[in-house]
Amino acid sequence: MSKLLVSALFAVLLAGCASNPPPETSAPVEDATPSAGAGTGTGAATSPGTGSSISGTATPGAGQGASALRDPNNILSRRSIYFDYDSDAVKDQYRPLVEAHARYLQSNRSARMTIQGNTDERGSREYNIALAQRRADSAKRMMQLLGAGESQIETVSFGKEKPKNPGHDEAAWAENRRADIVYAGE
Amino acid sequence: MTRLLRPLLAFALFFVAQWSQAQLTIEIIGGAGTTIPIAIVPFAGENAFPLGVTGVVGADLQRSGLFRLIDAANVSPRPARAEDVRYADWKARGADAVVVGSMTPLPDGRIDVRFALLDDVKQTQLAGFSYVVPQAQLRATAHKIADVIYEKLTGDVGVFSTRIAYIAKQGRRFELFVAEADGFGAQSVVASNEPLLSPTWSPDGTRIAYVSMENRKPVVYVQSLASGQRHVLANFRGSNSAPAWAPDGNRLVVTLTKDGNSQLYLINADGSGVQRLLTSPAIDTEANFAPDGKAILFTSDRGGSPQIYRYTMGSGQVERMTYDGSYNVSPRYLPDGRGFAFVRRDGGRFNVAVQDFATRQTQVLTQGSADESPSVAPNGKMIIYASEVGSRGILAAVSSDGRVKQRLTAAATDVREPAWGPLPKTN
C-alpha cells in the first residue's frame, strides 16, 4: 500500500500537477547553471522567477559545491526526512529536501551518500530493521527519479537501534522515525 | 615485563567489573497455584566447599515456581543417605519430598557428590545418583541434581543445566553474554560500541549467530563459543538480519535486502550457497524453523500489516496464522511443535502470546506495555522475553500457562534480546 502512495507521489511530480502549493517547484527543471554555491534561502524551496538575488540557480541543490552541504542557510545542510508511524511514504513536506539532495548528486557525479533508515522504539527489532530499510529505499528511489545515479546512494537500516531522541513519548518517537542522509567523507 | 603488568591488571579489573555488573538477578514475582513442598537437607560435608550445592539446588527448584522449600537447616541428626531418612519426621514438617546427600573430597582433588530423592508420601526412593567431579564443576552438578528432582516430581525435563544468551547495553556499549539459566557466571561473547541484536543458538549449543552493526549496517555473524572465533555469515547489499538455524545446524534462514525488499534466504552455516526461499513484494522476516525442520514460521506484511505466516517446505504452501489485530510478529515454535509463541500489539501495548495450531486459540501471557523477543525454553514450560520497567530494559520469564512469573535484571544495565539455549548433550 505504501508503494502505491509513493508511485502516486511520483505521478503527481511528473505531471506537474497544480495541486502542489504554489511556492514549490512542481516540475523537474533540467538545466542548472553552476553557481558559486551561494545560499538559496532557508527552509522552503525557492521558486524560479521570484526575483531572488541569487543568479543562475534554478533549483536548490543543483550545481552546488561541497561547501553548500555544510551551509546552515542551505537546504542541503538539512539531512533528515521524517515518517509517519508504520509508514515509509516520503511526505510532501520533505520533497524539496529530497529534490535538493538529488540535484546535488546529479551535478556532482562523484559524490556518494548513504541514507540511514530508522524507526521509533516500538515493536519487534527485526521487523523494524526491515521497515527502516524500506524507508531508506523509499527516499533513494525518489532521488533516483529526480536525477541521482543509482550507484551514488547506499541505503542501510539501523532499525530502532540508534534513536536520535532517547525519550518515550510521541515527540521522541516522531523524531526517531527518520531517514538520515550522510555524505561520504563526513 | 612489569611495564605490561599494570595496564594488563587494569584491563583485567575493568573486565571483571563489567562481568559482575552484567550478572542477572532473578526474582520470582508470581507462582503456580499449587506447589510441591520439598525439603532439601544440606549435604554432609558441604560446608567444606565454598559453593553451597544444596543452596543452588533449592534456588533452582524454587525459581521454577513449582516447588516450595521446607526448612531443613536445623534438623538434627542430619540424614545424608536414603536409609537415614525417617519419613514420619518429614511428613510432620509438611514435606512431600526429601533430598539428602553428601560431598566427599577424593585424594585426586575431585569430589564425590551423591544424593537421594525420596517420596515422603509413598515412602519410597525415587532417584539416587553419584557424581565424581572437579571442584570447578560443582555448580553444574547442582543444576544436574535439580534437573533430576524436577523431572522425577513433575514429569517434565528440567532446564536448570541450560544457558541463556542476552544483550546488555550500558551507555554506548553493547555486549552479548551467555550465562547459566539462573543468571550466574555470565561470560562475554562479543562486545561493541555499535548495536548487537538477534542472538540465536545453533541446535547443538556450540555456536551463536547474531546481528552486529559494527560495520555501520546490519551484518550477520556466526561465532563459536568454545574458540571465540567468528565469521561473517551474510554481508550483502543493504541489511542482513534475523538469522534462524535449521534443526540440523548446517543451514540458516536469514533476511536479506540484496535484491530489493526484505526477503528470506537459505544459507549454509559457512556463508556459502545463498538461495532465495520465498518471493513476495513485501517485507518477509523473522523466520523460525519447526522442530522437525519441515516448516518455517515467519513475519510478513504481504497482507497489508505485519502478521505471522507458515511456510511448509515440502509443498511450498504459505498459510496465514494470525488474524486478530493489526500487528502479530516474532513467531517462535514451541518445542513440541504444537503451537508457537509470538508478540502481538493490542491498543498500543505489545505482549507475548501463544497460539495452539490445532485449536487456533491464542492466550496472552504477559501484561507489560513493551514486551518483545520471546524465546522458549527447550522443555516448552517457560518463555523468556524482553520487557521494560520504568524505562529500563529487563528480561522476564513466564510459564506457558501464564502463572509463574520471573524478572531478570542487571544492575545499571539495559538487558534485552534473550535466547534460551538448548538442552545439554547427555554424557
Image: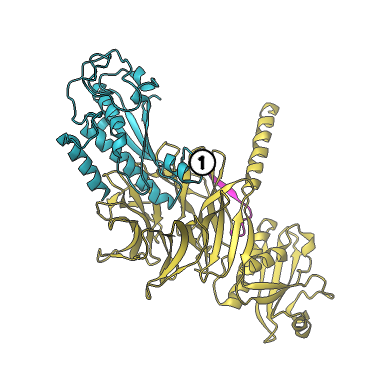
Is A17 on the left-hand or right-hand side of B140?
left
Is A110 on the left-hand or right-hand side of B189?
left
Indicate whether residue B191 is drawn in magenta.
Answer: yes
Q: Residue at x 54, y 38 (%)?
A: B172
Q: Colour of chain B?
A: yellow
Quarter in which the C terminus of chain A is drawn: top left
**Could you tell me the amino acid type at mark 1?**
Pro
- Range drawn in magenta: B181-192
Q: Is residue A82 above or below residue B324?
A: above
**Picture quadrant of residue B259:** top left
Identify the element where label 1 is drawn: loop
- The chain that hosts pointer 1 is A
Q: Is residue A68 above or below residue B127?
A: above
Determine if residue B370 is in view: yes
Q: Colour of chain A?
A: cyan
**Picture quadrant of residue A147:** top left
Q: Nearer the viewer, residue B107 or A68?
A: A68
Q: Residue at x 22, y 20 (%)?
A: A58
Residue designated by label 1: A166
Q: Nearer the viewer, residue B267 or B168?
A: B168
Horizontal and vertical percent position of residue B164: 54, 56
Q: Residue at x 25, y 29 (%)?
A: A24
Horizontal and vertical percent position of residue B110: 71, 60
Is B267 on the left-hand or right-hand side of B90?
left
Q: Is residue A21 above or below residue B291?
A: above
**Picture quadrant of residue B126:** bottom right
Which residue of the protein is positioned furthest toward the bottom in this rendering?
B122
